[in-house]
Image (tube, rainbow, N blue to C red):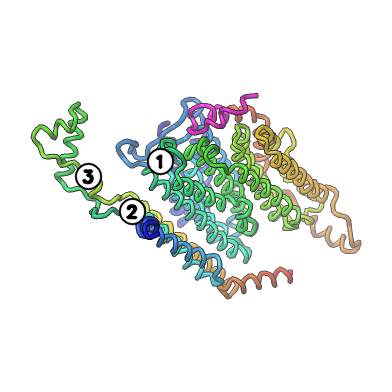
Amino acid sequence: MAEQYPILVLLVLLFGALLVGLAGMADRRICFPVTVTALALALAVSLGILQRVINEGVIRYFVAGWSRPVGIGIELRIDTINALVLLTITTVGLLAAVFSFRRVKEDKTEKTPLFYILYLLLIMGLSGMVITGDAFNLYVLLEVSSLTSYALIAMGKSRRAAVAAFSYIIMGTIGASFYLLGVGYLYLRTGTLNMVEIHQAITGLEGVSSAIVVAFVMIIVGLMIKMAFFPLFGWLPNAYSYCPSSTSCVVAPLMTKVGVYVMVRMMLTVFGTEWVFENLQYSQWMVGMAVIAILAGSVMALAQVELKKMFCYIIVAEVGYMVGGAWLANHWGMVGTVYHIMSDAFMTLCMFLAAGIFLKQAGVVRIDQLDGMFRKMPLTMAGFVVGALAMIGIPPTCGFFSKLYLIRGGMESGHWGYVVALLISSLVNAVLFFRIFEIAYFGKKPVEGHGHHADHSERSVIKEARLSALVPLLTTAVIIILLGIFNQDLVDLIERSLKGAEVIGSAVLSGEGGLG
Amino acid sequence: MGEIFKQYVIDHFNFWIAVILMMIGLYAMITKNNLIKKLIGMSIFQTAIILFYVSAGVKDGATIPILEHHAVEVEQVEMLAAAAGHSPSEHAASGHESHAINPDDYSNPLPHVLMLTAIVVGVATLGVALAVSQVIYKNYGTLEESEILAKIKAAENDG
């Protein structure tokens, strides 16, 4: 059983989706329990995978037993980094699914089974992207997750949801096609699609092959569109703010983060850090672009009046953190990036869960409508505050530690602009969230005295969110704090993985920095 | 000059065609005002990549990659012999005519098979995109991007 874990994660979700479809025809009420069961099983299996990877090292699983030298099979390859990201995905998936309880039914009654089918397929696609060891298979799963997210976003009640989804489809397809073209160049030059074999072929070539440089640039540009890196982020804010809250809670934390993860995987396992950092001199440029992304995302977040839009621009800035961290060509930068992929997934989840609750219970769309929320919804605000503190980067939360590692990487590699941008962005986040706290705690100043009373009677109806929404939010808050408290253990795992032979092609990173 | 032209254009004309098609598709996706025209551009873009892969698998004078029966048998015998410790050349030298499979005789099937998957992905994307544009038409009564944006702006100014 244990050796079948890698495929089991995907099969559980895939059959879950099938079962939801079949059960949904008979009775819509079955959909939710089936979905949650499938996700809980996937979470359990990914925990098992993590434990196995820690104990036994890299898992190489050949689908249907077509092992490499003879067959042309697809390999699933899991090291510590994938296992951690996989665990993040399944956890976020489960929490967001619990949050969607009853909410989906209220939004669109006839579409409940469809929503859950797409939801499970989305999580399946993302998990598959993380654990696959085959470059073409990654493309297929990338498209599975993208297609499902297009459909989920287009389900939004707002008229603008479909328009946002359409521009996302156009941009997403360009991104995926660039990735596919890059893989084509790689295949023509190396004759294989297996990531490890591509790596061996690239290191075997003498000098820098221009075909492989083109492949690398195409893959990275394609992924940049998918992860909404600064100049290519145009689709993100509308797509994530006009979709239903139960969708944004799963899409916003995961899609961009998995895009970043795939870029990290390409840099580590497929091309290898020696090749990326020593043969190509792109580091300076990429970190520079990341600095612009961080600053631009933060400034645009400041300009927003809508809560969800503000979170969307914070995501743009956070993507800048991670891309910059990965391109620092430094041990701590890479550790920080991998750690930040996990912590940012939970931070973003927390933000969007809270935004969903505010929208549902109090109809809050704009920030100034949060007036007096601490009194009306104390538990929701408690969860929100933890997430906000993590976004700002205040010590016991995971946001502080990921920034710490990223800044350390920036200092050691001498990219001072990146360090400054990170600090400025933290300050901007502090301004953003303390503004919200002020409005929510003290209330806004009564500008017009007479309008105030009418407001009051209307708002006194607002009450605390129901349990199915509170439990995921508070669990996420606890996870954010736990990730922060146990950051040393996680970082040890990531470091061991980067330093050892486990992650192929991390030689440049393991040489520098040291354990400190 | 003629030499360079032959080397870069004639010998790689399949790549040139793929790239030109891709640029046409990309141009349509970015500049066209009508949503359906954008989708046509998207299809051209994806098809160009499929063409790129498929043309990469073709070899001059090669046939379809289906092995003839006896060739497979000989190959298997040779593999068994190799597994048993005899080298294939020994085996061939011991009387049999060599029927070893020459990869140059067969076109490469893998890119073609990959493109089957890519075609399916392309069709699925087109289906979702058409469904979404149908919803847009229901909501806004038009498929022209500029008109939709104008309506969104008008709605924003109202509320």
SS at badge 2: helix
Work out whether A321 lies above or below A512.
below
Q: Is residue B141 left or right of residue A184?
A: right
- Eye-nearest disc, 2 or 3: 3
Q: Quadrant of the N terminus of chain A?
A: top left
Residue tagged 2: B112
- Determine crowd level at label 2: few under 14, some 14-19, many 20+ residues with C-alpha closer than 10 A: some
Comparing A193 with A509, the one in front is A509
Comparing B39 with A462, the one in front is B39
Percent position of residue B81, x then y: 17, 31
Marks 2 and 3 close (CB-CB < 8 Å): no
Residue A194 marker: 1
SS at badge 1: loop
Percent position of residue A411, x then y: 69, 34
In the figure, residue A93 lies in which quadrant? top right
Q: Is residue A336 left or right of residue B59?
A: right
Between the C-alphas of marks 3 and 1, the distance is 24 Å
Between the C-alphas of marks 2 and 3, the distance is 19 Å
Magenta region, residue range: A494-516
- Eye-nearest disc, 3 or 1: 3
Residue tagged 3: B102
